[in-house]
Amino acid sequence: MGNTVALNPVIADKKVEQLPKCVQQWLAKSGALEKPAPRSVSLLQSGLMRTSPRGKWMKVSAQQYFDIERPAFLWNANVRMSPFIWFTGRDSYEHGKGHMLIKLFSLLPIVNARGYKIDQGSLLRYLGEMCWFPAAAKSKYIHWEALGPNQAKATMIYWGVQGEGVFNFDESGRITSFSAHRYMAKGKRSSLEHWHIPITEWKRFNGVLVPSKGEVTWKLRHEDFSYFKWEIIDMTYQY
């Protein structure tokens, strides 16, 4: 039997009072306290992606779906390498398991990755992308610790896998970045590296203020490798 977690329809005041002050301020600023917690979320995303620090940026369009009651997501992306060459990517997380599948021309598999390191990375992705559904901040599978007036660590444990990351906030209560140690693939090997997501813009969807534009970067020993610049085009909550 795995973990099954149900969120309360509205975040109770007592639960909010137990959170670090900066997390409380984030929830208040976002407007999430004024609404029921969504059961699921769907979004449309556009951006640019590259596969190496000096690689060519490629256009990306993606759809993503989140299950909030039982943590899961599905990210489907189309990446255009040139007018005649493209690949599709599917990143999924369900029942505590991650799966990354990349196909050239939507037909030829070039990446088909599973295993504990993928599970841990998928959990961290879900944790960081919680910024798009703030109501999940006080759920049974996420525990918070204050690190400073504008910084808090979130630890998530689900289906036997644990991951933790640090959220930074500005003085008004907006999330400005998320960081964690995540496995980075290097050929057939992988290593724990500093994974950093700075946020540059915010927008209201469904009456909730969330990050709408940012970047994803590996902060490596000798250089920073920014590999994905993203923007949220649309977002819908299902209650």
Image: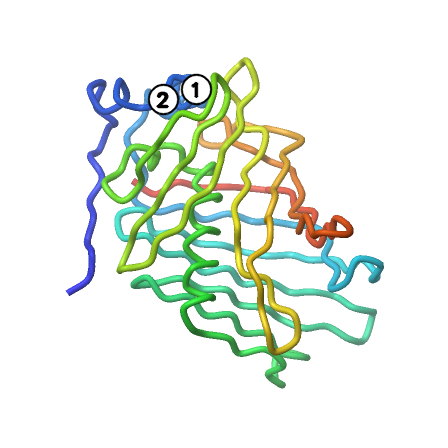
Residue type, numbered disc 2 = Pro
Give the crowd class for mark 1: few <14, some 14-19, many >=20 residues within 10 Å.
many
Pick the quarter of the image with the N terminus: bottom left
Give the percent coordinates (x, y) of residue 148: 47, 21
* Rendered position, 224 above or below 34: below
Q: Which residue is mark 2?
A: 20
- The residue furthest bottom is 108
Q: Where does the image place residue 75, in percent across and percent down from the top left?
A: 51, 59
Residue in the foreground of this view, choosing between 221 and 9: 221
Question: Residue at (53%, 78%) from the top-left corner?
Answer: 112
The percent coordinates of residue 17 (x first, y second) are 26, 18
The quarter of the picture where residue 145 lies is top left
Is there CB contact under 8 Å for labels 1 and 2?
yes
Q: Check disc 1 and report the residue beneath it.
A: 22
- Relative side of 213 to 90, left or right: right
**Dividing the image into 4 quarters, which one contains the C terminus?**
top left
**Rounded to the nearest whole Å, what is the CA distance between mark 1 and mark 2?**
6 Å
Q: What residue is shown at x 73% (from left), y 64% (from top)?
A: 51
Reply above or below: 232 against 144: below
Q: Element at badge 2? A: loop
Q: Quick one: which residue is furthest to the front in this view?
A: 221
Q: Check the image and report above or below for 105 versus 170.
A: below
